[in-house]
Image (cartoon, grey):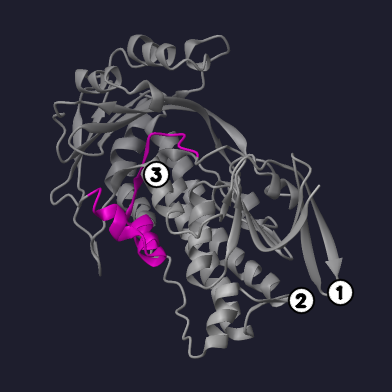
Amino acid sequence: MEEVVEDVVIVGAGIAGLATAVALKRVGVKALVLEKSNGLRATGAALILSRNAWLALDALGVSQKLNSMYPFIKEFRAYITNLESGAIQEISAAKRASGNGETRARAVHRKALLETLAGELPTNSIRFSSKLTKIETESHLSSSIAVIHLEDENVIKAKILIGCDGVHSMVARSLGIIAAIDSGRSSVRGLAVFPQGHCLKDEMHQFVGTRRRAGLVPVNDKEIYWYFTCSSPSKGTGLLSGDPKVIQREVIEKYAKDFPEIYLDAVKHTDLSTLTWAPLMFRYPWNVAFGKLSKQNITVAGDAMHPMTPDLGQGGCAALEDAVVLGRHIGTSIQQNGGLVQPQMAKALADYVEERRWRATWLIIGSYLTGWVQEGGSLWGLKFLRDIIFYGLLFRKIGTLMQYDCGNLPIFPISTESDKMKICCGVVAL
């Protein structure tokens, strides 16, 4: 059995974990990232990054690398088709810009995002095949140490522990955060590949019906990200089989059989290795608004803090925001205290939580309401609520959640060689 001590340990090498490690690197702190898988997790073909995510990526210093792979769209159109009436509504996708250019929502390969973030980290920053079995806490005068037990019986002692380990987070459980719940809905997602090119060009499509919703978003001129959400199926149905071919057939022949051909064609062209099915989980918003999301030297970020339904496409975007805000509070504490000093670091984590909790709460609420209204049904009252109130009045307001600017990371004025060594090594005073 090996026992080592690390300044900062991040659990989970997903979007939240890698982005947090990048943010900490930029404020002079080296973090060890523990990942239970044997490589970067690429579950999920693509994700939609809204303006708030691109601003966070700007702060992390990686947006330009992704911009070269996913160029800005000059004129973008979004269409929503009512499956019951056949009516098509165009939603304005007005051009929005930041200091680095246009930052409208774009679909990005999840793998490309993870690899870009991981590429910013020093060698050996990520330790794969590292599954947690237990988390304990040791107290030393005014400081705390998180004791992390791994499946291989090795032990890591962390002066700061950040849980980015997803919806079923062990770190969140150790903090006593109430578990996420099943929304009663499920989602299938995949990446359609058209070797000769597709016909969507610069447009996004959404299809809305009773307890069903689906969409198409172009990733590039040969790939389309598609999704399908519906009420969770009963046990024994094909969607639960885990077999991509069976899931694809179920979507085409059963769940989306009355969808327009443009959608069915995309599903038929799916790269089956990218197809996934999953129940949609979320944490009750009041558990985020009023729960204890940090304790001494331990906190959480991303889905470990605020799992939400994907109806606003904000899960990954919010995780990037978390990384910047957490990095900013830790960096500011370093500037004020000359290093990673406890117990001041506990205050930095608490301040991070207070800055994030209400932002995350409103994202959870907005996401849930968006899904509920859009898939509510064909009754007159629900149609009025969806078509007139939601799309006519509330959609733009909810859309402002996606224009949020999480801010920047602090800049370190390094004047001497000792200062450089101190920041580079992430000095921790206990």
Provide the residue designation for mark 1.
141
- Kind of residue at disc 1: Leu
Q: Position of residue 104 (x, y in %)?
A: 26, 53
Judging depth in this view, the residue of 295 and 129 nearest the camera is 129
Q: Quadrant of residue 194?
A: top left
Q: Is residue 54 magenta?
A: yes
Measure the alpha-carbon separation of dots 3 and 1.
45 Å
Residue ranking furthest to the bottom: 415
Provide the residue designation for mark 2.
430
Closer to viewer: mark 3 or mark 2: 2
The image's mark for residue 255 is: none
Q: Quadrant of residue 35?
A: top right
In this view, 394 is above or below 196: below
Q: Which residues are magenta?
A: 41-70
| Disc 3 to disc 1: CB gap under 8 Å | no
Provide the residue designation for mark 3.
312
Judging depth in this view, the residue of 402 and 113 nearest the camera is 113
Q: Position of residue 216 (x, y in %)?
A: 27, 32
Measure the alpha-carbon separation of dots 3 and 2.
42 Å
| Residue at x 76% of width, y 76% of height | 430
| Disc 2 to disc 1: CB gap under 8 Å | yes
| Disc 3 to disc 2: CB gap under 8 Å | no
Label 1 Cα crowd, 10 Å radius (few <14 / some 14-19 / many 20+): few
**First of labels 2, 1 by sequence position:** 1
Measure the alpha-carbon separation of dots 2 and 1.
9 Å
| Residue at x 56% of width, y 78% of height | 423
Q: Is residue 109 magenta?
A: no
The reply to whether residue 307 is visible in this rendering is yes
* Local secondary structure at mark 1: loop
| Residue at x 62% of width, y 36% of height | 181
